[in-house]
């Protein structure tokens, strides 16, 4: 039977304006900086400002997508937001995004949650829906992964924090990544490796259990995908992983490498192989830190941004892991002209336009952001800067957002 090709038509990343260098964090925590830079593989981490939350980041990523690609908001029939940093227990972030972008009223909007797996849940659901479009018709979905990774100050998880959002247009014109139509390779197990009770703003984690669970899920899903697709470790030009911290991608790659090396004697060295097939995707992860639901897709965007035309038509394997846990390994092929969209991804301009924080400023911003999470009194924030959309404060228990005049006029220009 004819299988309609589906996948990612466009991708755009929202990069928060502020960052903290991990060397400054190491110094404040009295830790050898090599532990953060080499042991965890990080470099900097994005720090959300008080007027940034999962809603503003999601909307900003989506606005960037429509500004930079030749796609129309009018075509969107479904919006799925994946997040574990929701600001409301009932109202969907997707509804806010839908309103801010003036998307068509004939549209299905909802959020999904399963720790870092939610972005993949959205992508896979949207792909199935796009594939099922009636003959001659077309379905286009906006899938957004948006999160703030926050751990206790001074805890082992602190250097793995981060923030940001990745917006993806999913359709049957998969210019950037066409997904392979193999049966799904999934793994779920009820495990207490990482969690965030609703009364807390920062996550709790059993670090060792989380790493073991991640690797166990990778072993299961990779073996299953290998069985259904007959694609082996060496058949991938690039291997992308969920990136809680960049060294985790190395641990994941190493496990697959060693598993493969048992069968073959002619393997390239582990380091050389990793540098060629995974490291090119990790640059943006090293700059932004963990994006939870968006981390894997930040790697995908980073690969396109970094390799450009050299990545065109290449086969990619993708591993998604969400604590708790649910995981999936899937694959696809980058588009034959994917490199030509390189300048539209938002990573380069986003990273170069950032402001560095001192450790003290990081603590102040963090404290202000956390205070707002539980504050229902009205306060007007000064968003400053050139943000597309800002959280302004809370009035009568309602969150107030402001879309900048620049974004409004860009939207009109896109429509015209
Ligand atoms: P830790 O226990 O403080 O660190 O926290 P460590 O002692 O294990 O050291 C880390 C690495 O640094 C080790 O390397 C050390 O040897 C090395 P490894 O043995 O692993 O290769 N090291 C040094 N290297 C150079 N110079 C030095 C030095 N000292 C030590 N001087 C941990 C590490 C990851 C546990 C912590 O950061 C943490 O709890 N992170 C959050 C949890 C996490 O990221 N888990 C990953 C898997 S779960 C997941 O991915 C899901 C998640 O994204 C959430 C979701 O699904 O929503 C987290």
Image: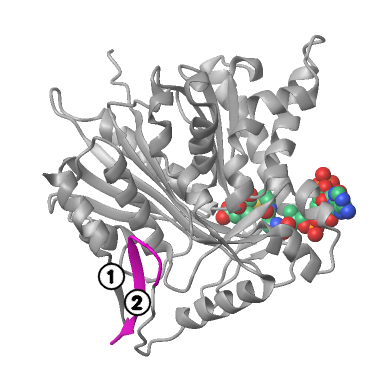
Which residues lie in the magenta part? 384-397
Does the stretch in magenta take in 16?
A: no
Q: Which residue is mark 1?
A: 402
Secondary structure at badge 1 equals strand
Q: Is 259 or 391 nearer to us in this picture? A: 391
The spot of residue 286 in percent (x, y) is 64, 47
What secondary structure is marked by label 2? strand
- Nearer-N-terminus badge (2/1): 2
Q: Position of residue 361 (x, y in %)?
A: 61, 75
Which residue is rendered at x = 59% and y = 79% of the image? Answer: 364
Q: Is residue 178 at all visible to an observer of this figure?
A: no
Q: Is residue 393 magenta?
A: yes
> In screen coordinates, is 113 left or right of 254?
left
Nearer to us in this view, 356 or 211 = 356
Q: Quadrant of the C terminus?
A: top left
Q: Which residue is mark 2?
A: 392
Residue at x 14% of width, y 50% of height: 104
Res. 415 image quadrant: top left
Q: Is residue 64 above or below residue 319?
A: below
Looking at the image, which residue is at 55% across and 25% down?
225
Is the C-beta separation of discs 2 and 1 under 8 Å? yes
How far apart in space, not on screen, are marks 2 and 1 (Cα)? 7 Å
Name the one closer to the observer, 387 or 90.
387
Please tell me how crowded label 2 is: few (under 14), some (14-19), or many (20+) other residues with Cα within 10 Å.
some
Residue 336 image point, x, y percent = 40, 17
Q: Residues within 10 Å of mark 1 (few under 14, many from 20)?
A: some
Determine if the C-beta at disc 2 is less than 8 A from ligand 1.
no
Q: Residue at x 84, y 63 (%)?
A: 31
Q: Position of residue 394 (x, y in %)?
A: 34, 82
Task: Name the mark on residue 192.
Answer: none
Q: Quadrant of the N terminus?
A: top left
* Quadrant of res 236: top right
């Amino acid at each position: 039977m004819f299988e309609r090709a589906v996948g990612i038509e466009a991708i755009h990343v929202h990069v928060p304006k502020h960052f903290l260098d991990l060397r400054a964090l190491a110094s404040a925590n009295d830790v050898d900086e090599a532990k953060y830079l080499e042991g965890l593989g990080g470099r900097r981490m994005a720090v959300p400002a008080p007027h940034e939350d999962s809603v503003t980041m999601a909307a900003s990523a989506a606005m960037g997508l429509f500004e930079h690609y030749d796609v129309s908001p009018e075509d969107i029939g479904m919006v799925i937001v994946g997040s574990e940093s929701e600001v409301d227990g009932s109202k969907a972030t997707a509804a806010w995004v839908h309103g801010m972008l003036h998307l068509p009223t004939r549209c299905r909007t909802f959020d999904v949650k399963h720790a870092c797996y939610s972005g993949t849940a959205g992508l896979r659901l949207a792909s199935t829906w796009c594939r099922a479009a009636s003959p001659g018709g077309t379905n286009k979905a906006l899938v957004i992964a948006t999160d703030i990774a926050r751990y206790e100050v001074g805890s082992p998880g602190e250097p793995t924090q981060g923030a940001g959002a990745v917006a993806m247009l999913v359709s049957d014109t998969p210019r950037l990544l066409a997904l392979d139509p193999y049966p799904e390779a999934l793994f779920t197990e009820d495990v207490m490796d990482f969690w965030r009770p609703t009364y807390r703003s920062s996550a709790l984690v059993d670090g060792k259990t989380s790493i073991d669970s991640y690797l166990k899920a990778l072993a299961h899903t990779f073996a299953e995908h290998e069985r259904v697709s007959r694609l082996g470790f060496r058949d991938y030009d690039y291997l992308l992983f969920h990136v809680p911290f960049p060294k985790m991608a190395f641990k994941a790659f190493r496990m697959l490498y060693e598993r493969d090396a048992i069968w073959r004697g002619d393997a390239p060295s582990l380091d050389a192989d990793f540098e060629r097939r995974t490291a090119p995707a990790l640059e943006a992860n090293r700059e932004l830190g963990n994006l939870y639901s968006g981390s894997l897709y930040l790697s995908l965007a980073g690969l396109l941004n970094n390799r450009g035309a050299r990545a065109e038509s290449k086969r990619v394997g993708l591993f998604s892991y969400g604590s708790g846990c649910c995981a999936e390994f899937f694959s696809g092929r980058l588009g034959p002209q994917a490199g030509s969209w390189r300048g539209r991804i938002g990573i380069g301009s986003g990273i170069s336009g950032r402001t560095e924080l001192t450790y003290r400023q990081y603590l102040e911003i963090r404290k202000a952001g956390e205070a707002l999470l539980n504050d229902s009194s009205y306060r007007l924030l000064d968003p400053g800067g050139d943000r597309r959309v800002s959280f302004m404060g809370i009035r009568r228990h309602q969150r107030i957002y402001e879309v900048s005049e620049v974004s409004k006029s860009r939207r009109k220009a896109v429509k015209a």
